[in-house]
Image (cartoon, helix red, strand yellow):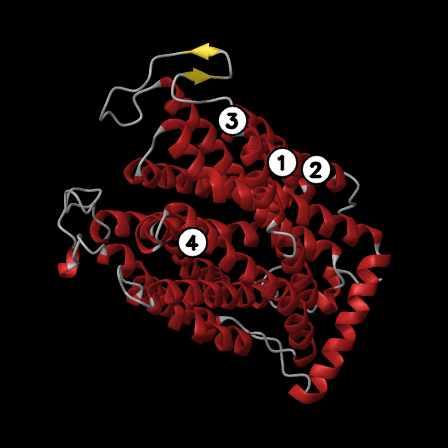
Amino acid sequence: MTTVSDIPLQSTDRRAVLSWALFDWAAQPFFTLITTFVFAPYFASTLAATPAEGQSLWGYATAAAGLCIAFAAPVLGSIADATGRRKRWILLFSLPFVICCWAFWYAAPGSPNGIAIALVAFAIGTLSIEIATVFNNAMMPSLVPPERIGRLSSFGWALGYASGLVTLVIALGFFAASPESGKTLLGFEPVLGLDAATQEGDRAVGPFSALWYLVFVLPMFLFVPDVPHQAKIGPAIRAGLANLRMSLAQARTNRNIFLFLLSNMIFKDGLVALFAFGGIYAAGQLGWGSIEIGTFGIILTITGTLGLLLGGPMDDRFGAKPVIVFSLIVLMICGLGMISIDRTTVFFVIKTAAAPEGALFASLPEQVFIALGGVIGAVSGPLQASCRSLLVRIAPPQHVTQYFGLLALSGKVTSFLAPLTVGVVTALTASQPAGMSVILVFFGVGLLLLLRVRER
């Protein structure tokens, strides 16, 4: 059987490696600023009629994008494997991504088409950047020797986390301002004359993300070597689709890859729900507002970056599977700790005083919540980085793009399930902690399946 070591490797080119990793740096503001911390809360709290309606509509757009990714990623990956070129596919999907990022500026409060613009831009933008990421991931084996795949993967994730931190500080410190005070998180007037009353700073993160991507993705196109052209697009489509059918059949018969993809599908569902509901949970259980949630996001980004710096060497030394197993165990322990916290309770039974009015993170429950969240941030990055390095080690190298498509498929095809289950359990029990506890089950089942995967 052919292994990763059979791929013809160039001598490691540091400029190419850095340029490849800058793709994560370029793309991250979309996930940090738009999907999580700035535009999404603006959409739910201001653009939509009610926060509940906003959360529901945002969920529908997320599900639509995930469904398209689930079907498109493996098909396009198989075609790219047949044609041999990856960068032109990244360019093809970068164009609609940049347009969608810019479109968020036009989703203004009171605009008759604001909601539609935001939802369409979010769905198409998510689809575009996720597909582009599949092709960027597939270039990894040609950049470094197999024993350095883990460090390369973690290096890319670390740059992404650092980019999220830098752009979040810029957005909260200079763009997005409180409508009441007109000041940003750092106490400044919004730059460029952005109107705090109409929350132009929240919408400005769209064009900012577009410009950030355009600037920092260029080195990847200029300095990362691409796989030589192998076939014309017409025959490649037919060959690619045939290879996809074969890979799906192989994935079903290859027990090792099948177990990994199934495990990835389940624990990634839990991870999606954890990040989707983390801010909502903190707001409900601890009474946090945008300043607290934004600050919490900065803390998680810092610990996530530090975790990735340690995770890459651990991946190369001990293997990707031990890193993933350790991360899932830590996620379960910290997740249990977080659902044990409310404004006056820690670990279900320890009672403490509530935070003084207006004080930032002054109570013991808040401090414990932040500490547990920081640990979760530290292991979430290595978990995801080691997933792609594990796939490189166990997938047939001649179809690596195709299997990254299957990895994207397994990570998206049921991504609605954990959030839906959390919502149903929360509604039935009228308890946020009970709803969040479902996430621990997804982590546990994913861990049990992963234990049966052989890395080598």
Image mark for residue 194: none
Q: Is the residue under label 1 in contact with that under label 4 (CB below 8 Å)? A: no
Counting residues from the start of the chain, the first of labels 2 and 4 encountered is: 4
Image mark for residue 339: 3
Q: Indicate the quadrant where residue 10 lies.
A: bottom right
Q: Which residue is drawn at 14% across and 42% down?
A: 181
Q: What element carries label 1?
A: helix
Instruction: Identify which amino acid the numbered label 4 is placed on.
Output: Thr
Instruction: Identify which amino acid the numbered label 1 is placed on.
Output: Leu
Decide which of 72, 435 is in the foreground and name it: 435
Using a 10 Å C-alpha cutoff, classify the residue at mark 2 as few (fewer than 14 neighbours), some (14 to 19) or many (20 or more): many
Tell me the distance, in whole angstroms, between the alpha carbons under discs 3 and 4.
23 Å
Q: Is mark 3 on a helix, strand or loop?
A: loop
Counting residues from the start of the chain, the first of labels 2 and 3 encountered is: 3
Decide which of 47, 230 is in the foreground and name it: 47
Q: What element carries label 2?
A: helix
Residue 312 visible in rendering: no
Decide which of 219, 86 is in the foreground and name it: 86
Image mark for residue 447: 2
Q: In this view, does 53 lie to the left or right of 422?
A: left
Residue 190 visible in rendering: yes
The spot of residue 62 in percent (x, y) is 51, 57
Tell me the distance, in whole angstroms, between the alpha carbons under discs 1 and 2.
7 Å
Q: Is residue 243 left or right of residue 130?
A: right
Q: Tell me the residue that label 4 is attached to.
A: 35
The spot of residue 382 in percent (x, y) is 56, 43
Q: Look at the picture and state if 391 lies above or below 303.
A: below
Counting residues from the start of the chain, the first of labels 1 and 2 encountered is: 1
